Image (spheres, rainbow, N blue to C red):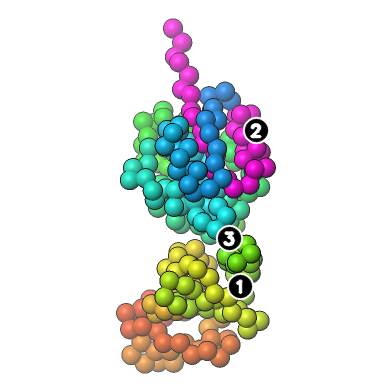
Amino acid sequence: MEDKIKKFKVVIIDDEKHGRELLKKLVIMNGDDFIISGEADSVESGISVIEETEPDLVFLDIELYDRSGFEILEHFSQINFSIIFATAYNYYAIKAIKFAALDYLLKPIDQSELTQALDKVRAKVDNNGSGKSRISLAQSIMDKPKPDKIALPSDSGYIFIDINDIIRCEAESNYTKFFLKNKSEILTCHTLKEYESLLEGLDFFRIHHSHLINMKLVQSYIKGKGGNVIMKDGTQLEVSTRRKDMFLKQFAKL
């Protein structure tokens, strides 16, 4: 008697309809063991469809209108489904690892990369859910190019800026202000801690609880208890005592 083929229920969460339609087609092309059981375009509808359909796999876009797809995952005290992120931005990669995502696909989605991701879903079942996904995801992320832009939320949508144009970021309560090379300033409704995570591995360093700086744009360092840095735009910022040694190590590598 032949073994029964495992069927995987799939939910796709993306705020762009054409993105959901394309992903559905690509998934279906990979075999009849993947069945689309639901789709959603927001945090609320995403939570609802997951609770209703109890999927085996969720494809999740991270930028959903003005909210984050991570909020969907944070809603669940226990995640009983595999996660594959499908997003246009790879600066969320480190946070994806924290959620033990199975894979992280950059848009436009490549058919061969999707096939490899779905094979990981099948392999996870064969390996009884062994904890290899974090390792494979980390390797996958290392193989992807570093992003050159970041999307900052605005009243009308998003502002895309070159990461190399960011001189520094400053905390203002639960907001963050970006200071750019062209002397413009952008205030965003996310914390400095969130941007510290997003810019991790991109030559940014948090020298103080209020300041995240672009290490490539440090002009000089002034010795002191913690010391001070002078940025390319002439701004002088304090380095906290407890971050001094780590800062100097990072500074020496540039």
Q: Is residue 170 visible?
A: yes
For marks 2 and 1, give the one nearer the viewer: 2
Look at label 3 and name its amino acid: Lys
Q: Residue at x 62, y 62 (%)?
A: 157
Question: Residue 2, how many percent across, how many down?
Answer: 46, 10
Label 2 environment density (alpha carbons within 10 Å; few <14, some 14–19, many ≥20): few
Q: Which residue is mark 1?
A: 164
Q: What is the spatial separation of the Cα atoms under label 1 and label 3, in whole angstroms? A: 12 Å
Would you place residue 21 above or below residue 73 in this image? above
Q: Which residue is mark 2?
A: 25
Look at label 2 and name its amino acid: Lys
Q: Is residue 36 left or right of residue 240?
A: right
Which label's residue is closer to the chain start, 2 or 3?
Answer: 2
Look at label 1 and name its amino acid: Asn
Q: What is the spatial separation of the Cα atoms under label 2 and label 3, in whole angstroms? A: 28 Å
Q: Residue at x 56, y 45 (%)?
A: 41
Which label's residue is closer to the chain start, 1 or 3?
Answer: 3
Does 28 appear in magenta? Answer: yes
Q: Nearer the viewer, residue 174 or 34?
A: 174
Q: Are marks 2 and 3 in contact (CB under 8 Å)?
A: no
Badge 1 element: helix
Q: How many marks?
A: 3
Magenta span of residues: 1-30
Question: Residue 92, how many percent across, how many down?
Answer: 50, 57
Which label's residue is closer to the chain start, 2 or 1?
Answer: 2
Does 251 appear in magenta? Answer: no
Q: Residue at x 57, y 23 (%)?
A: 32
Question: Residue 161, how many percent across, how many down?
Answer: 63, 69
